[in-house]
Amino acid sequence: MTSAMRGIIFILAISILVSGVVARRASLFRTKDAIKGQYIVVLKKNAVIPSVLQSLREESQLKRVPFSNPLKEYNRVLNGFAISLSKETLAAVRAHPSVRYVEEDGVAYASEIWGLDRINQRDLPFDDSYTPAGNGSGVNVYVLDTGIRTTHEDFEGRAEFSYDAMNYAIGNDGDCQGHGTHCAGTIAGKRYGVAKAAKVYAVRVLGCYGSGSWSAVIDGMDWVASNGARPAVASMSLGGGGLRAVDESLGNLHRAGVTVVVAAGNSDLDACTSSPARAPEAITVGAIQDDDARVYFSNWGACVDIFAPGRGILSADYRSDDSYRSLSGTSMACPHVAGVAAIHVGLNPNLSPDSVRDVILESASRDKVTELHDSENLLLYVPNES
């Protein structure tokens, strides 16, 4: 064999060796909502975690590249570890012979989004899907409540502060109690919202203790009737004793072209005894839990038009721009319906408030709710995308 031929064979051997190294690199799997630079490394069955980490550290020291300590080590359910990696150290980990695969770490969310799942299907069990026919684009939803943390990530810039009937000097984008932010997130949040493209506007009529005067509530309705952009929906997760002026104001807000959705109340009483739940123009919402039973606290009776999820509802929290929390109440059921109203209006902006009410009630799932206590048996439903 000539020296030239031996050289060719040597080069081919090197090429095969390099190709083999590349082929042995562990797979890298991507994930939704990945945490930048953070990975889960799964080792082969008989690999020993401390030994693998030590060899990776030694290799990094030779290359003068920092190598982090693992964030977590797993010994029972997985043989592996979670770790922060740079581009260079990720490549080294994937090339290690004891590594089976690498996967991007990601954000896990609490599973309390059953509300969206339930309103998008006729029957139980849950199908882990929410694919509504619309997203509320172009619709303005006015949230008469404690305010909205408009900077929260869940709103994607679609939240604004419109009017303060309480005159609290806490900033023009604030919520000092959290109730309004949570309701707004259920209406239009990107993560847990019903109408994920609708705009939400804070109209503060309740203060930092979650209460306010009826005069402030009427002031808020008056402002929306006069200044609210159309097409519009108003969400009012509030209530109290019956007040004629409140009921009349709501009726006039409805006649001004605004679909008004209200909470039935949380006293396990006849909703016809409280305002604004008893207002005939309102879409009054009672609460169910995840087995389709009326929640024990939900008001009931002839003034309740429809039921919606209202127990263990996860939505935006007012304490930071990326926090979430779970709340229960007809206050949580109301914004589900407001969101569905926004979807219908988004699909047909010429719908009147009466027409919106009709389409919501006529499309509702029938005879699904138990423990009704003399209420109409209608459960909120939003059609699937075709």
Image (tube, grey):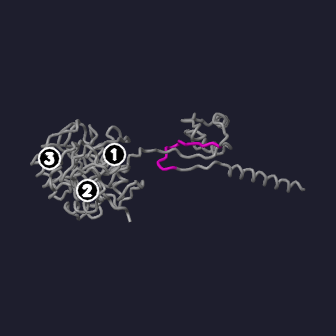
* Residue 348 screen position, x and y as percent: 27, 64
Q: Which of marks 2 and 1 is in front?
A: 2
Q: Which of marks 1 and 3 is in front?
A: 3
Label 1: which residue? 313
Residue sitting nearer the eye, 170 or 315: 315
Dot 1 falls on a residue whose secondary structure is strand
Q: Residue pushed farthest left?
A: 244
Q: How many marks?
A: 3
- Residue type at tag 1: Ile
Label 3: which residue? 273
Label 2: which residue? 377
- CA separation in Å, label 2 and label 1: 21 Å
Residue sitting nearer the eye, 85 or 359: 359
* Residue 370 screen position, x and y as percent: 29, 52
Q: In which quarter of the image is residue 74?
A: top right
Q: What stretch is highlighted in magenta?
A: 31-44
Q: Give the mark nearest the N terminus, 1 or 3.
A: 3
